[in-house]
């Protein structure tokens, strides 16, 4: 009798333990959108990313595995220590299960350290450094939208093929700029070109005239802009003033967003070649989604914001399938489910955290070619996923099994 | 607080030494780093252009601090308002660049006068910190409102057609617009200095700062003069904003980017010294230009390094008089 009772209790105990494993922690799935709300990348991610995340949650139904979904947001001010502190506070005190977006690669690298240590999911849409799936990779990191390797192989290769065999870089002096300069230099040298020099400008520099003068003096055919957001806009705008293009040199906007083109105006930006994962006017699905986004924000969506929507949706699908929000389990499910949404077709999450998707090469239209508001790009080429991203054989990520 | 002739001998001693040091340094460094002298002159000229903006903005700050005792942290926001005013005038009213140069500073100056009447006049007799906090708060509100509405990437504002193009100076191509900026700022800075130092109106202003009661006893309306002076300082900031609109993006962030550097310039020149802020503005533009050639990564911090050195050696600033 006693033995049966103990056995019965043990059996119930096992059942309870098993059920507890398949539970959502704290009875809520909390998604934290950590982004730049107030500085030079605010139009690339910013409030638009929060809106995109909320749209994804609403479209999913507001609940997953029977538990409600909450979206919180914060401004990381482009400072790694601020971003890491917010991440830690979110995870330790506010029960946040996944952190999304983080433009600014230096902040993303710091936040990845935190999420790796605490086993929380990190859905990276804004940050670019390919080190996030390289030597700094994480088992719960998902690099969703694009990276510096794709930009280098997209824009860099295209321009080298067009005859741009000498390059001079104007680089933002932090993790992202260095990674982009390194990856693009590798592409240029592999194609037989030469890098004549580089100058490192502090992040958020308003005046590039001095660096542009040095670029002019180098006589390089291509001036590679290894920067983004406000820095890229200022470089190109001031380059127009100094007659860089009239002098025969070309700008390579290695990371250009549609918000940058909108700010520069087509007169200045026309002819720029750029690589992107998304353009609002590509097909009916992208147009429909963009229309909903613009109804809420009055701004045309960038690939970062579209990526936030896609990443959150896929994350929620994975939770529903895995019936838990534990970091590694959810990411394992995200790897199993193929990625299909308005932006991604048959995308796949690799073991180093890289999402394999097709990238697209665009060129900015001239004012005469643009027929309606935000009609800015024409598509030049599709770059298939296996060519766009670093092959696993070259990966420095410790999670990748070589052999 | 009153700007007057610097301590006899001090600046004579310093300025020749500084320029001598700079010249000696250049000759040593050019062969070392293989920078051709022509490229160097080009960079120095660009540094002078940046210096022109620093000079104009720090001039407005020095006027306001020297004569009103307010540390006007809203100066950057007022610079941004000037640029946005020019953009509004162009896009909403079709008013071009040249009329904007006059209308925008006046409009923003009027706004500044409203701020002064509503907020600042209550705190003149208090510690400087209150003025700093109040204007800092105002700056954050103004910039936040604009950022909410217009985002951070900025709006395009094109260079007026009469000023587009480049001059071939031999050692570099100088955009005509940038040449115009140096000329306009030099005129405005010299004009302001002359107004305050050499005219009767300026004499009244300086006297009113020293002893307002006595000056008012002579029948001069001191509060109105103070209000108009604040408006004038704000107008200077807005004018700098209109000059900046075609070359930097008209962005809500443009003020916060530049204001910290401008404060460093004012501190180096001596808080309240008009001549000091003009000279330091141009000189520090040159220093920053040189840093961008030899060690660009430090270009955003070199001015603060100079400020630290100056404060250690001469706490009142290069042209300031210890109060």
Image (tube, rainbow, N blue to C red):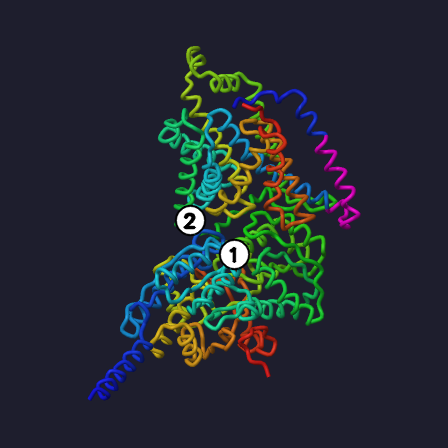
Instruction: Report the magenta residues as a range.
Output: B17-39
Check contact, mark 2 vs mark 1: CB within 8 A. no
Q: Position of residue A167 (x, y in %)?
A: 68, 62
Residue at the spot of label 1: A229
Which residue: 34% across, 62% down? A71
Answer with left or right where residue B88 lies relative to residue A368: left
Residue at the spot of label 2: B147
Residue extending farthest to the front is A2
Q: Position of residue B72 (x, y in %)?
A: 46, 33
Q: Position of residue B57 (x, y in %)?
A: 54, 35
Is the N terminus of chain A in the top left, top right, bottom left or bottom right quadrant? bottom left
Kindly identify which numbered label has been placed on residue A279: none
Given residues A324 and A31, the one toward you in this image is A324
**SS of the residue under disc 2:** helix
Chain of the residue displaying label 1: A
Residue extending farthest to the right is B31
Which residue: 40% across, 75% down? A330
Q: Residues within 10 Å of mark 1 (few under 14, many from 20)?
A: many
């Amino acid at each position: 009798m006693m033995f049966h009772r103990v056995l019965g209790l043990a059996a119930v105990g096992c059942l309870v333990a098993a059920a507890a494993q398949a539970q959502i922690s704290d009875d809520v799935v909390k998604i934290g959108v950590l982004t730049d709300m107030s500085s030079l990348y605010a139009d690339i991610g910013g409030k638009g990313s929060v809106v995109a995340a909320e749209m994804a949650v609403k479209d999913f139904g507001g609940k997953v595995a029977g538990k409600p979904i909450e979206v919180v947001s914060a401004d990381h001010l482009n400072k790694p220590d601020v971003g890491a502190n917010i991440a830690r506070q979110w995870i330790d005190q506010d029960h946040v299960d996944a952190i999304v977006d983080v433009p600014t690669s230096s902040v993303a690298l710091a936040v990845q350290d935190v999420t790796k240590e605490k086993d929380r999911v990190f859905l990276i849409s804004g940050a670019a450094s390919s080190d996030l799936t390289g030597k700094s990779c994480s088992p719960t990191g998902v690099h969703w939208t694009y990276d510096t390797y794709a930009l280098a192989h997209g824009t860099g290769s295209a321009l080298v093929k067009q005859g741009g065999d000498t390059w001079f870089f104007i680089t933002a002096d932090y993790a992202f700029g260095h990674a982009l300069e390194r990856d693009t230099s590798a592409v240029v040298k592999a194609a037989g070109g030469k890098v004549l020099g580089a100058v490192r400008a502090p992040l958020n520099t308003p005046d590039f005239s001095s660096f542009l003068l040095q670029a002019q003096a180098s006589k390089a055919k291509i001036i590679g802009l290894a920067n983004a957001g406000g820095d890229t806009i200022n470089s190109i705008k001031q380059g127009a003033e100094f007659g860089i293009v009239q002098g025969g040199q070309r700008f390579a906007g290695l990371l250009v967003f549609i918000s940058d083109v909108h700010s520069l105006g087509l007169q200045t930006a026309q002819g720029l070649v750029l690589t992107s994962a998304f353009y609002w006017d590509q097909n009916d699905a992208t147009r429909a989604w963009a229309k909903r986004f613009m109804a809420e924000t009055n701004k045309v969506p960038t690939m970062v914001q579209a990526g936030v929507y896609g990443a959150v949706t896929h994350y929620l699908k994975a939770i529903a399938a895995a019936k838990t929000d534990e970091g590694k389990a959810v990411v394992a499910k995200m790897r199993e489910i193929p990625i299909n949404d308005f932006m991604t077709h048959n995308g796949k999450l690799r073991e180093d955290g890289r999402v394999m998707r097709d990238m697209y090469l665009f060129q900015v239209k001239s004012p005469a070619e643009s027929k309606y508001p935000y009609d800015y790009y024409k598509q030049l080429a599709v770059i298939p996923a296996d060519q766009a991203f670093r092959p696993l054989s070259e990966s420095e990520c410790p999670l990748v099994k070589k052999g | 607080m009153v700007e007057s002739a610097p301590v006899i001998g001090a600046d004579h001693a310093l300025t020749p030494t500084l320029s001598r040091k700079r010249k000696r340094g250049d000759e040593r460094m050019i062969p070392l780093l293989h920078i051709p002298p022509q490229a160097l002159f080009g960079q120095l000229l660009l540094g002078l252009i940046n210096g022109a903006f620093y000079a104009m903005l720090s001039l407005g700050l020095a006027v306001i601090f020297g004569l009103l005792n307010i540390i006007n942290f809203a100066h950057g926001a007022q610079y941004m308002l000037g640029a946005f005013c020019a953009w509004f005038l162009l896009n909403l009213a079709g008013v071009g660049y040249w009329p904007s140069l006059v209308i925008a500073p006046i409009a923003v100056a009027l706004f500044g006068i409203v701020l002064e009447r509503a907020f600042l006049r209550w705190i003149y007799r208090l510690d400087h910190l209150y003025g700093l906090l109040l204007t800092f708060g105002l700056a954050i509100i103004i910039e936040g409102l604009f950022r909410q509405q217009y985002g951070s990437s900025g709006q395009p504002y094109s260079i007026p057609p009469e000023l587009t193009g480049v001059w071939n100076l031999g050692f570099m191509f100088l955009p005509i617009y940038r040449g115009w900026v140096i000329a306009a700022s030099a005129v405005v800075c010299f004009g302001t200095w002359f107004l305050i130092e050499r005219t009767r109106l300026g004499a009244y202003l300086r006297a009113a700062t020293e002893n307002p009661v006595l000056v008012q006893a002579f029948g001069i309306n001191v509060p109105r003069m103070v209000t108009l002076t604040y408006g004038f300082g704000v107008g200077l900031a807005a004018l700098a904003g209109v000059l900046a609109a075609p070359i930097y993006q008209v962005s809500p962030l443009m003020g916060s980017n530049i204001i910290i550097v401008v404060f460093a310039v004012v501190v180096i020149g001596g808080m309240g010294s008009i001549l000091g802020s003009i000279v330091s503005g141009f000189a520090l533009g040159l220093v920053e230009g040189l840093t961008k050639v030899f060690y660009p990564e430090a270009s955003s911090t070199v001015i603060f390094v100079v400020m630290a050195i100056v404060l250690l050696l001469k706490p009142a600033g290069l042209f300031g008089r210890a109060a």
